[in-house]
Image (tube, rainbow, N blue to C red):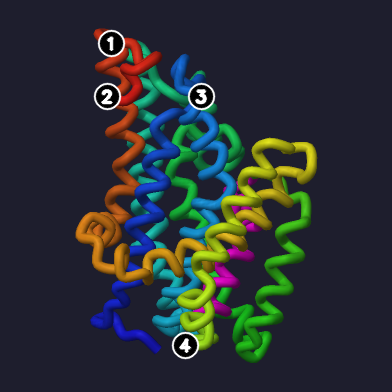
């Protein structure tokens, strides 16, 4: 079990890599800039696996910390702690983003601007496919998963394979986009895989250290196939396969000597939660201002 004071450099680097990929994907929300087909392809590839990798890391850390095995007696305290850590920031930033978009859309270009305040608030909490603050969905989904996992693990007598089977069933079920439950069902399986990887300990680390480059090649190959022949797989199938392939590839990559002590990734990892909350408002504000003086088509996009 990992105490609060322990640090795993590979996990910090992995979080840094993950949040970097998230920010790159958030630069463009809707219509892409003309003359930058390379970014369209890059974003399409990133969205096949980057949040799956983030959820895997969350499961890994949750299992190492012992939170996944929380007893029934300690579970209410865990819920309060996770609500304070995840749900409160989600509501604060979700409301701030929603209200900010509603106001600023009158003066600036705004991605996913709400049509009315009623629709905006409904989208934030209930009909979440239309949330103006969809960019921060991860933290409310992580809250749901973190409070569901411990009681399930207690009932399953700490059998992680039962958890994995349960999340695999959830993945294929048609869950409606209400209160982000569809996203929780889509990403719970990657959280469970993170728990399984942490449970395997050195056995998993030895595997990814040995096969990280082949795993990376497999990930690239699958991404190329899904992008060139999208009809081969449904979006859910592509996300599952690419997401699973990314776990040994990216975790193994950040354990390589050339990457493992990257000051940039370590810094990004240390502030990943803050970056996740603030990156889309900052990107949106910058775009809203710059769009008034400089289009982002062509080579200008590199400046953005």
Task: Give the Cα distance between marks 4 and 1.
Answer: 52 Å
Q: Earlier in the sequence, mark 4 or mark 1?
A: 4
Residue sitting nearer the eye, 14 or 289: 14
Tell us which disc is closer to us: 1 or 3: 3
Work out whether 79 lies above or below 171: below
Q: Earlier in the sequence, mark 4 or mark 2?
A: 4
Residue identifier under label 4: 202
Residue identifier under label 2: 303
Whole-percent x and y of residue 262?
25, 61
Q: Which residues are magenta?
A: 178-198
Secondary-structure class at tag 1: loop
Residue 149 within the magenta-colored segment of the rendering: no
Whole-percent x and y of residue 294?
28, 10
Give the label on residue 294, or none. 1
Whole-percent x and y of residue 4?
28, 80
The residue lying at 63 percent from left, 43 percent from top is 224
Q: Quadrant of the N terminus?
A: bottom left
Tell us which disc is closer to us: 2 or 1: 2
Q: Quadrant of the C terminus?
A: top left
State left or right for residue 113 relative to residue 283: right
């Amino acid at each position: 079990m990992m105490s609060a004071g322990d640090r795993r450099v590979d996990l910090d680097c992995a979080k840094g890599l993950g949040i970097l990929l998230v920010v790159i994907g958030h630069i463009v929300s809707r219509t892409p800039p003309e003359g930058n087909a390379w970014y369209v392809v890059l974003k399409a590839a990133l969205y096949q696996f980057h949040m799956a990798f983030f959820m895997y890391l969350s499961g890994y850390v949750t299992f190492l910390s012992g939170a996944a095995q929380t007893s029934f007696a300690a579970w209410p305290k865990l819920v309060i702690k996770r609500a304070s850590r995840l749900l409160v920031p989600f509501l604060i930033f979700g409301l701030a983003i929603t209200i900010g978009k509603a106001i600023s859309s009158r003066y600036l270009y705004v991605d996913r601007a709400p049509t009315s305040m009623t629709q905006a608030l409904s989208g934030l909490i209930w009909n979440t496919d239309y949330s103006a603050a969809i960019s921060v969905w991860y933290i409310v989904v992580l809250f749901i998963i973190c409070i569901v996992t411990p009681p399930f693990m207690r009932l399953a007598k700490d059998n992680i394979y039962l958890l994995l089977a349960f999340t695999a069933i959830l993945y294929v079920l048609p869950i409606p986009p209400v209160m982000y439950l569809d996203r929780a069902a889509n990403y719970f399986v990657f959280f469970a895989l993170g728990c399984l990887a942490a449970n395997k300990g050195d056995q998993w680390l030895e595997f990814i250290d040995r096969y990280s480059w082949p795993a990376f090649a497999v990930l690239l190959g699958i991404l190329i196939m899904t992008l060139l022949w999208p009809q081969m797989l449904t979006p859910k199938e592509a996300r599952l396969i690419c997401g699973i392939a990314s776990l040994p590839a990216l975790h193994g990559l950040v354990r390589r000597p050339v990457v493992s002590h990257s000051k940039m990734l370590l810094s990004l990892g240390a502030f990943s939660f803050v970056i996740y909350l603030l990156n889309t408002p900052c990107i949106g504000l910058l775009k809203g201002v710059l769009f008034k003086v400089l289009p982002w088509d062509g080579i200008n996009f590199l400046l953005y």
